[in-house]
Amino acid sequence: MANKGQPRGMDARERAIAKFRKAFGAMPESIAIAPGRVNLIGEHTDYNDGFVMPIAIDRVLAVAARRRDDRIVRIVAVDFNETDEFSLDAIERDEKGGWRNYPRGVAWVATQMRLPLQGIEAVITSDIPIGAGLSSSAALEVAFAMALLKLNAVRAEPMVLALWCQRAENEFVGVRCGIMDQMAATLGKRQHALLLDCRDLSYEHVPLPEGIAFVVADTGKPRTLAASEYNRRRQDARKRCGCCGRCWDALSKVCGMWTAMRWKRCLSNCPIPSVGGRAM
C-alpha cells in the first residue's frame, strides 16, 4: 500500500497521524505498525510444515485509530484514496476483492472468537510497495488487528495474533497462505532473522552478521496472492507430497538424510505427472 507521492521525509506513522486528524478531526488514540518482510530461505515450505527464515524490513504499514461507542468500523486507506465501512454484527466479504477484505477478515475472526469489541475509526498508510512480494497484506492484517484489539483492551500474544491473521487470510480473504508472513510481521526483530519451524511454530531469532546489508530489488512486476495461482500451487504440493507417502515426513522437515537423487527416484513414481514440475 505504498504511495509514490508521499511527502519526502514523512514516514508511514507520521502520515497516518496527519491523515487521521484530517479525516476525523482529532488525534488517534492508538498507532499500530507492522513491517514487510523478505525471505532468506524456504520458499513454499511454510504451508508444507517446513523451515523458513524471513527478515522484517524497514518498510512498514501504519494504522492510526480510535475507539467508537458503537459496532461500526470506518476505515480510510490513504494510499488508495478509498474508504470502507462495515458493522461488526454483519461482516461480509467484498466480492470485488482488494484491500478491504483484509481488515474485514481480521474483524471477522475476532467476532468468531467472541471477543468483546466496539467499532473503531482507522486510517491506513504504508511505505511497503504493493504487489512486490514483501507481504504488505500480512502487514495490513497484523497492524489492523493490533489496533482493533488494543482499543478494545484485548491482549493477544504475537504468535496467537499471527494465527488469527492467517485464519483471516485463509478463511475470509480466500488465500490458503502459510504462517510465515504473519509470524514475520509479529515477531520480526531488528538485526535478526526469524528461523521458524512451521510444523510446531517453534522459532529462534538468529543474529545477522555486523555490517551485512540485504538489497531488495523491485522488478516492477506485480504479485498478488489473491489474484494468482497460489492456491493451486499449494494444492499441487499437497498432492505431490501425498503421493510420496512416508517420504513426506522427511521432506517437510528438510532432513539431510534424503539426498537429491533419492528424492528424484521417489518423485518419479508419482502418478500425477502434471504436478511434478510445479510442486517441488
Image (cartoon, helix red, strand yellow):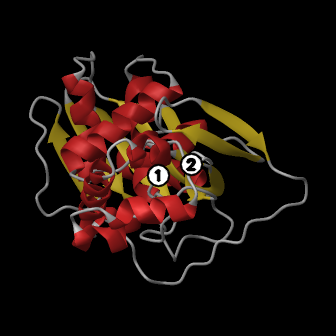
The kind of residue tagged 1 is Thr
Please tell me which of labels 1 and 2 falls first in the chain: 1
| Residue drawn at point x = 36 percent, y = 38 percent | 165
Where residue 150 sits, quadrant-wise, is top left
Where residue 36 sits, quadrant-wise, is bottom right
Q: Does 73 appear above or below 10? A: above
Tell me if I can see residue 33 in this picture: no
**Between marks 1 and 2, how big is the CA–CA gap?**
7 Å
- Tell me residue 77's x, y (percent): 35, 57
Which numbered dot is residue 52?
A: 2
Image position of 238 (left or right of 19): left
Badges 1 and 2: C-beta atoms under 8 Å apart? yes
Quadrant assignment for the N terminus: bottom left
- Tell me residue 104's x, y (percent): 24, 43
Q: Which residue is mark 1?
A: 45
Badge 1 marks a residue whose secondary structure is loop
Image position of 88 (left or right of 134): left
